Image (cartoon, rainbow, N blue to C red):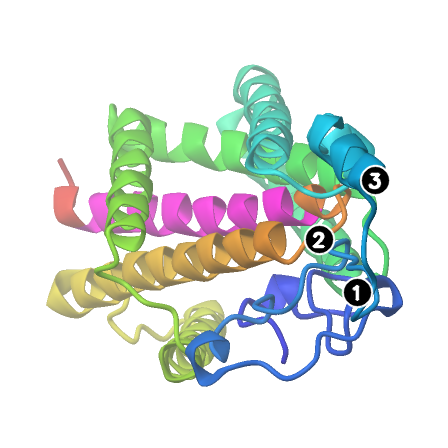
Amino acid sequence: MRSSNPVFSREGSFTRDSGYAGFDAGPRSSAHADNPYAQQAPYAQQAPYGTQLTDQQLAEMYGAPSAGPLQTGRMTMDDVVARTALTLLTLVAAGTAAWFTVPVESYNVAVLVALAAFVVGLVITFKRSVSPPLILLYAGLEGFFLGALSKVFETLWPGIVIQAVLGTTAVFAATLIAYKSGRIRVTPRYAKIGISIAIGFVILLLVNSIAWAFGADLGLRSGPLGILVGLLGIALGAFFLTLDFNDIEGGIRGGAPQQESWRAAFGLTLSLVWIYLEMLRLIAILRGDD
């Protein structure tokens, strides 16, 4: 079964359709059908059926130290947190550099950097193996763009950046609490509906951008419609976070390789960047010409 998050649904990602490292997952119960990793752990090797272990073998197994990530090479939550922190730190450092070095009137340079970040993000998404240098490069490029963009917004609406940062943090915390408490359950139907809405949302923004380039205005940048679109964009960012949380939990339970924690960090960074950009746009609409 494929992972629900587009970032994690590529070859070489968390998905293991026929068992990881050659271990067949076997049939899964319907209770675990929603989780792409709800299968026999790849490292959970068992003695052949009918084999009797001696007392000495049992004693050795009992006295052996528990296997940690260094022994098994499996991804842990600590791995995900550490890689995500490093990725976000790179993003913030690059954003800070852009803030102090890129003049507001030279914003076009940041747009070119954003295009480069987009290309690198596509390479990471479709690449079979995980590449930490590419992920950190993406974070640096994206951070540079966000730093320059944030400076432009801050010039027009003083204080908007800290408001957007606090808003993004609040959305992340609320989504995590709702997910961990069971109020949000990631099911195939939930994922399909959300991704369909997200595709429509991106198409709408592209059409609006093209219309704006030719001097037309669809009303998505201001007024009640702009506010509604902004709220929808933030909700979609929270939706992608729930997919990230679900795939990370499933990867840990299914014994995904430790290297996959970098892919998890990349997915979380994408979702947070999405939310921050939509938060900036929404606050700008709400503040108007203040």
Q: Is the N terminus in the top left, top right, bottom left or bottom right quadrant?
A: bottom right
Residue at image location 42% in from the left, 69% down from the top: 212
Sequence-wise, which precedes: disc 2 or disc 1?
Answer: 1
Q: Which residues are magenta?
A: 263-285
Q: Mostly what secondary structure, the magenta segment?
A: helix
Callouts 2 and 1 close, C-beta under 8 Å: yes
In the picture of the structure, the residue carrying the numbered disc 1 is 20
Q: Quote the CA–CA distance across marks 1 and 3.
A: 27 Å
The local crowd at label 3, few if under 14, some if 14 to 19, many if 20 or more residues have their Cα within 10 Å, is few
The local crowd at label 1, few if under 14, some if 14 to 19, many if 20 or more residues have their Cα within 10 Å, is many
Left/right of residue 171 with respect to residue 215 in the rendered view = left
Q: Quadrant of residue 242?
A: bottom left
Residue 165, above or below 252:
above
Sequence-wise, which precedes: disc 1 or disc 3?
Answer: 1
In the picture of the structure, the residue carrying the numbered disc 2 is 256
Query: Which residue type carries mark 2?
Result: Ala
Residue at image location 55% in from the left, 67% down from the top: 5
Query: Which residue type carries mark 1?
Result: Tyr
Q: What label does residue 57 carry, if any?
A: 3
